[in-house]
Amino acid sequence: MGWYNGLPEYSDLAPDLTMGEEAVVIGQGNVALDVARILLSDVNSLKETDITEQAIDALSRSRVKSVRVVGRRGPMQVRCTRRV
């Protein structure tokens, strides 16, 4: 999430999204679901957001067509923030 939001500490991260058609996201909270959503979103729609150009470039080359979200624990341990 920090990578596509442009946080400086993640600026050197360069995920290779061309390795295959399936990605696995570990976790089942807000961040995990947001990462899955970004990986499966249409790049043209993402261009209308404040996502970084670096991320747009990587996502435009992405071969990912499906994402598996894998929970590490049970539903009682899921962390989701409440937006007000």
Image: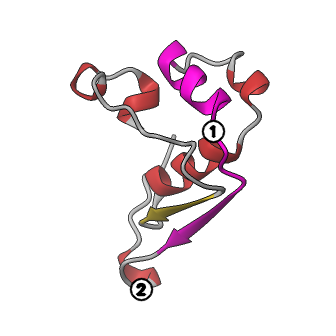
> Which residue lies at the image location 46% right of the left edge and 82% below the top edge?
75
83 with respect to 44 (left or right) = left
As drawn, the residue found furthest toward the front would be 19
As drawn, the residue found furthest toward the bottom would be 74
As drawn, the residue found furthest toward the left would be 9
42 with respect to 57 (left or right) = right
Amino acid type at circle 2 is Gly
The answer to if 63 sits in the magenta stretch is yes
> Which residue lies at the image location 54% right of the left edge and 42% below the top edge?
17
Measured from the top left, where is residue 59 in percent x and y? Answer: 61, 32
> Which residue lies at the image location 54% right of the left edge and 68% below the top edge?
69
- Mark 1 and mark 2 lie on one chain; the one further toward the N terminus is 1
Measured from the top left, where is residue 47 in percent x and y? Answer: 69, 17
Measured from the top left, where is residue 65 in percent x and y? Answer: 72, 53
- SS for tag 2? loop
Name the residue beneath numbered marker 1: 62
Question: Which disc, if any, is residue 74?
Answer: 2
Q: CA distance from mark 1 to mark 2?
A: 31 Å
Measured from the top left, where is residue 14 in percent x and y? Answer: 38, 32
- In the image, residue 58 above or below residue 49: below
- SS for tag 1? loop
Amino acid type at circle 1 is Ser
14 with respect to 4 (left or right) = left
The answer to if 64 sits in the magenta stretch is yes
Front position among marks 1 and 2: 1
Start-end of magenta stretch: 52-70
Most foreground residue, 14 or 67: 14
Mark 2 neighbour class, 10 Å CA radius: few under 14, some 14 to 19, many 20 or more:
few
Most foreground residue, 43 or 78: 43
Q: Name the quarter where the N terminus is drawn.
A: top left
> Which residue lies at the image location 72% right of the left edge and 40% below the top edge?
41
